[in-house]
Image (cartoon, helix red, strand yellow):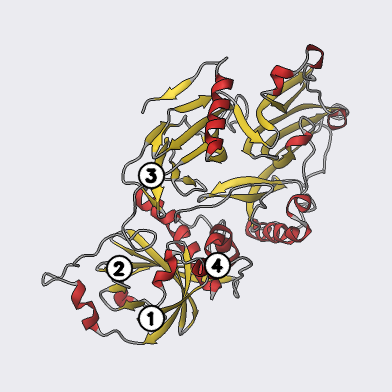
Amino acid sequence: MRKIFQAVLLLLLAGILAGGCTGLNSEYTLRIIPPRNLELPLQGSWEIVALLQEDRAAAGEPAQEWIGKTLHFSDKYVLLGEHLLSNPRFQVKRVEAEAYLLYHHQAFPEGFRFKNKEIEVFTLSDSHLFFCELLRENDDELLLNLFNNSYLVKKIADEVDETIFSPFVTAEGTTAGTAAMSGTGSPAGDFSGNQTGVLLGLRAPGEDDQGYTGAQYRTLWVALAEGKLAPVLEIGTILFPRRSGFYRLQVVRKTEGEIEEDILLVNNILGQEEEKEEEDPVEPALDPSRWEGKEGYIHRRIDYIGNDYVSVEERIRQVSLRDGSSNEKSQRRIYAVDSLPVMKAVKFSDLAGPEAVAAMEHGQQKLLQQLGLKEEVNLQDEDNYGLARKMGYWIFKGRINYPQKGGKAGARENGNTDTYKEADYNITVIPPDHVVFYNNLNIPWTRVKNQVPSAIDVFTSPAKDLALVITDKEIIVYRMSQENLAAHPLERIPLKDGEEVIMAEWALGHYVENWTLTCQTYLAREDIKEYPQ
């Protein structure tokens, strides 16, 4: 049952984002159909019989209010409980079960798995506004994904008694009293809250065509207290919290002769003031084993920074001093913050567990099949992966490097250049808490797209009172209540061209004041920027 429900959620996101979850697979189909062309299993009347997340029902959450309500699908109307859809449309799509669960695991009980590798998802909307998703378990059972909750739905009649729609339709044929539903099916409450804040790390592309050279980093501090937004502070570097205090992360380019390498440096910002003069930071050094008999460059840019791990992309070109042959490629890496500036990558099995390697290998094999590659690529590299954003979540993203057509990697002659292409694939493993401390989405992605069609990402607070909607041009700050965005934003923060979010660290309660003081203390010796309210 839960498998069908997860499939429904994935289809919704995939449909709105033009198949973002299906990657390179072109076998999936998308159809938009009116109800009069509905195919089984949706035609008829259904009853919501159970909430799949038993812990939510036991806690008395509003989600259980839907248990016992009926769903009616006719040739013209759809009735969800007391909510009539007068212009219903369905998006129908087949998606991968693993990918769907990856992006929508919050809606399912822990450990849930689909029975089939692929699932069919029906996404229901009315006048271009999303309402829910339905997924077939069998001919007489569906899974319903409604407001980020999953329900078991059973058929009670093959046909619908048309008179059931009469109380909801006026003489003119329009719906009467039908309004947009909130996260609980009732009007959204007030948006007042206590204290919530977020440190948002941003990376703007650099000067070269791949955005490595001269990449710019900054941190924004956004704080909400009693429903009001404090002045947004900007720090011209990456400032991030750890158990032992606040740290600064910098990408420093080290040059020695014909060798150039970007080094990641981390230092405690408060500890700097307490250090004695004889304890100056050590000058970053290049790793001799990496450059023995070679010259060239290794350029790095940050994709993600958390409390204990940093994910980077590396562009490498190394030339042999012996025969002039060269090697060029781009790869992903994850490093432990405690190991920096030593650039020793963390293997996937060490980070996510040995059992997670099977998911990595599955993603690799699938990508190779899509690319039409077989034995040309060495897949024993457990280091070539990182973290990326996708529809409101941090996910693992693996990378394959494969040689250009015309020669195999490693077949070198004097002066030969091995140039690699790269292709990425999703690893269907949820990043563990020690890697991404908070990785939840407290509002359905489709609801965000309904209100902000230009949205490409969204971050929601653990307190469910603040949301930051990301577009190509700005960050739109909203208050939240009952899994809804407020009608009007609190602030619009402009983004630089190509700027992306690489960090979101949340603070609640009295920590908000502490973090505000830390930011202000750091900025006391630098230029401070505030965005007008």
Q: Residues within 10 Å of mark 4 (few under 14, many from 20)?
A: few
- Residue at x-position 42% and y-position 80%: 41
Choose the circle earlier in sequence order: 3 or 2: 2
Residue contact between numbered discs 4 and 3, judged by CB atoms under 8 Å:
no
Residue 149: x %, y % from top left: 47, 65
Q: Which mark is residue 192?
A: 3
Mark nearer the viewer, 3 or 1: 3
Q: Residues within 10 Å of mark 3 (few under 14, many from 20)?
A: some
Q: Secondary structure at mark 3?
A: loop
- Residue at x-position 36% and y-position 76%: 69
Q: CA distance from mark 3 to mark 1?
A: 38 Å
Residue wearing tag 4: 55
- Residue at x-position 48% and y-position 69%: 150
Q: Secondary structure at mark 1?
A: strand
Q: CA distance from mark 3 to mark 2?
A: 34 Å
Q: Is residue 360 left or right of residue 304?
A: right
Residue wearing tag 1: 46
Choose the circle earlier in sequence order: 4 or 1: 1
The amino acid type of the residue labelled 3 equals Ser
Mark nearer the viewer, 2 or 1: 1
